Image (cartoon, grey):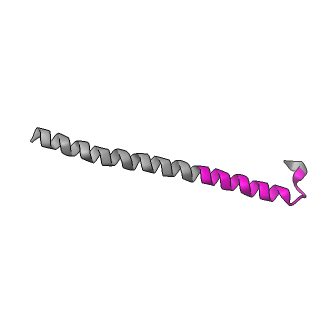
Amino acid sequence: MGSARGTTVSPVLCFIAHFMGTFQYFVKLFVVTLIAFFIFNNFKIVYGAVKKLLR
């Protein structure tokens, strides 16, 4: 890492690595949000069915 300090390649590589890390984080966040939303929707359906059964 230290040997490539004077070139223009290292900032670009750092930027790409940082961008990929951020992108990965956003993808994880998106997937977690999707799963949570899906579970929440199913929970609402299941909760409604249970309420009907208990009524």
Residue 2 is situated, as x and y percent measured from the top left of the image, at: 87, 49
User: Percent position (x, y) of residue 42?
Assistant: 31, 45
Instruction: Residue at 65% x, 50% y: name it.
Output: 21
Q: Is residue 9 left or right of residue 30?
A: right
Residue 10 rendering spot, x and y as whole percentages? 82, 55
List the single residue furthest toward the bottom. 8
Q: Place residue 7 in its image quadrant.
A: bottom right
Residue 34 versus residue 7 in the image, above or below: above
Disc tally is: 0
Quadrant containing the C terminus is: top left
Please say whether residue 8 is one of the residues in the magenta stretch. Answer: yes
Residue 17 drawn in magenta: yes
Dominant secondary-structure state across the stretch colored magenta:
helix
Identified at 62% across, 54% down, the residue is: 22
Residue in view at x 12 percent, y 39 percent? 54
- Locate residue 4, reporting x and y percent: 88, 52
Camera-nearest residue between 49 and 5? 49
Residue drawn at x 47%, y 47% as measured from the top left:
32
The region drawn magenta spans: 4-24
**Residue at far left of view:** 55
